[in-house]
Image (cartoon, helix red, strand yellow):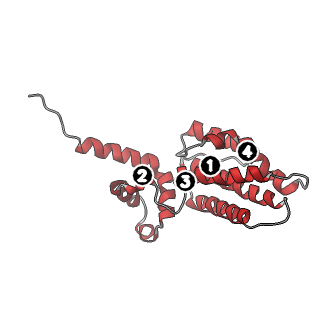
Amino acid sequence: MCDIRLFKSAYLDYQAAVSLYQTPFPDEMYFNIVAYHLQQCVEKVIKGALECVGVTVPNTHRISKLLQMVIHNGANLTITEWLDDHAEMLSEWEAESRYNMDFIVEKRKIEQAVQQVGSFLEQNGIGENLREELKNIRVKETLMSFLPKEERLKCSIFEMNCYYIMFEKKLKRQENTYESEVRPVKTES
């Protein structure tokens, strides 16, 4: 079952990675911790999106395998070119950064990953700013109508963005229904 807490956890992993990256530390192994949080962020977002389309997610940390599942199952997720090109590197970061004491992630790779994972989150509407689709009041109101009343009252922008991922297909069906109902019928003169 889709649970927006997975998206929240992913976002917090990203925030932790950024915070750690911005805090100078005199040991290069420090970047391994940043790398691990970036990998976890990506993994959790992908798994969350897969769960939202009813996929039982396997117990894997392989980003490339998870990305293939996104493509084959129609999950509501934009896969960036960088993410597709660096899936294996991110997968390596999951275990190597924690258990291989000789493994060191290069600073330049961390710099790029921080920026690119942030871009991945932004393109998928996972953040504190209202995603573009929800700036349409009708779409936003329709989304809120899918939620229990008590959830509507306390729903943050971040949570709305995540609920959009959950309900994107249902929202598009609803929008198509609305469009067909309000479209004027052409009559021949």
Vertical placement of 69 versus 19: above or below?
Answer: above
Q: Position of residue 179 (x, y in %)?
A: 29, 43
Compare residues 143 and 90 and report the one nearer the observer.
Answer: 90
Which SS class for mark 3? helix
Q: Which mark is residue 62?
A: 4
- Which image quarter: residue 40? bottom right
Q: Earlier in the sequence, mark 1 or mark 3?
A: 1
Say whether residue 71 is visible.
Answer: yes
Comparing labels 3 and 2, the label whose residue is closer to the camera: 3
Determine which residue is flagged by label 2: 133
Q: Residue at left 18%, top 37%?
A: 185
Q: Furthest-top residue in view?
A: 188
Q: Which mark is residue 122?
A: 3
Q: Position of residue 25 (x, y in %)?
A: 81, 66
Which SS class for mark 4? loop
Look at the image and tell me in which quarter the C terminus lies: top left
Q: CA distance from mark 1 to mark 4?
A: 11 Å
Q: Residue at left 35%, top 46%?
A: 175
Q: Which mark is residue 46?
A: 1
Q: Earlier in the sequence, mark 1 or mark 4?
A: 1
